[in-house]
Image (cartoon, grey):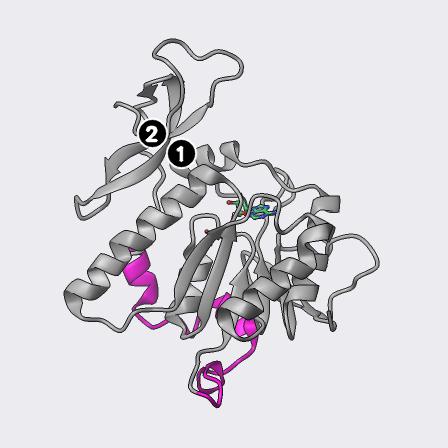
Amino acid sequence: MSAGEDSLGAPGVLGETEPKFHVVETEDEMGRPAKGLARAVSNNTSDDSVRPVLVDFLSGKMRHRLRPGADHEFLVKAIGLKKSDRVEASGRPVLVCDFTAGLGTDAFLMAQAGFQVVAFERDPLVYALLLDGLKRYRAHESELGLMPIGLEFRQADVALTDVAQRKALAERLELDFGRRPYAVVLDPMFEEGNTKTKSKPKKEMATFREMLHPSSESELRCLLETALQVGERRVLVKRPVGALPISGDIRPLNRREAKTAAYDVYACREV
Ligand SMILES: C[S@@+](CC[C@H](N)C(=O)[O-])C[C@H]1O[C@@H](n2cnc3c(N)ncnc32)[C@H](O)[C@@H]1O
């Protein structure tokens, strides 16, 4: 497989500084051209034994998951607003923020549940997959004449963890959306072994996990502080079942726990 536009450098064997992953041209389940994340073997070839990871909001798995609607989703329930309350008196959908977009599943499900969602991702390759996945979903929406869901992705780099940028981020969101996010969601990468899940991630997801570094506790605290200042009412932090809340002085109001994941729910404070 040849690497696509986002791989770097001249052909040849990877050196120590060369990227281990790159974005390649592939296909989604429906055979439409898509961008995928693959492990690099050399500067212009990828490991063909593992399917590239891609963002596919139209996959059979996602369609099956959404068959009963998004209201039964654990995250949607944990936000704590019933469907009729997800629309403001002015008719605008309630805004929520996802600070750790990843492959966009949570953001997409929240948008399907009727929220206006803005989701941040710091990794530039993962961000490229998100834009590509959303573009394919938008094409599907317009082909079928569906009502567009309220979803957008933004690249975060250090914006969410740089204390000096906190206020500017809150102001930017207020300027762009005319309101603060009712809730902010965090689903960081956990250290291996910090989860009780016995099943191994699929090969493709193992590639994804390998590429992204787990967040340190101090980074998590910083992300939580930013979320609490940006959000209006709630911050939800996904934790492995049985794991302690993020360490430090800020304590969650409560914990919502399901079989495979838990959300610590925090109350926001005034900026
Ligand atoms: C476990 S994944 C999230 C999965 C996501 N909830 C989903 O539904 O696909 C964590 C993601 O958060 C991103 N991330 C971690 N720290 C971040 C930060 N400070 N700013 C923005 N994104 C961050 C990582 O790059 C990674 O893609």
Across the whole image, how many numbered discs are drawn on residues?
2
Q: Where is residue 201 in the image (x, y as percent from the top left)?
A: 46, 40
In the depicted structure, whether residue 137 falls above or below residue 6? below
Q: Which residue lies furthest to the right in this view?
A: 249
Residue type for callout 1: Lys
**Does the beta carbon of the residue at mark 2 sit less than 8 Å from ligand 1?**
no
The mark found on residue 16 in the picture is none
Neighbour class for label 1 at 10 Å: few (<14), some, many (≥20)?
some
Residue 148 appears in view: yes
* Residue nearest the observer in this picture, 138 or 237: 138
Which residue is identified by label 1?
203
Residue 73 belongs to the span the image colors magenta: yes
The magenta segment? 61-90
At label 2, the amino acid type is Val
The dot on residue 50 is 2
- Compared across the picture, whether 249 is left or right of 73 comes to right
At a point 36% along the width and 9% down the height, the residue shown is 12
Tell me whether the residue at label 1 lies in contact with that at label 2, contact meaning CB atoms closer than 8 angstroms: yes
Q: Nearer the viewer, residue 132 or 113?
A: 132
**Above/below status of 202 relative to 89:** above
Q: Is mark 1 on a helix, strand or loop?
A: helix
Describe residue 38's horizontal placement relative to residue 233 as left or right. left
Q: Which of 241 and 117 is in front in this view?
A: 117
Residue 249 percent across, percent down from the top left: 84, 59
* Circle 2 SS class: loop
Residue at 44% x, 73% y is 115
Task: Give the side of residue 117 with respect to residue 139, left or right.
Answer: right
**Residue 121 lies in the magenta stretch:** no
Q: Mark 2: give few (<14), some (14-19) or many (20+) Cα within 10 Å.
A: some
**Mark 1 vs mark 2, CA separation in Å:** 7 Å
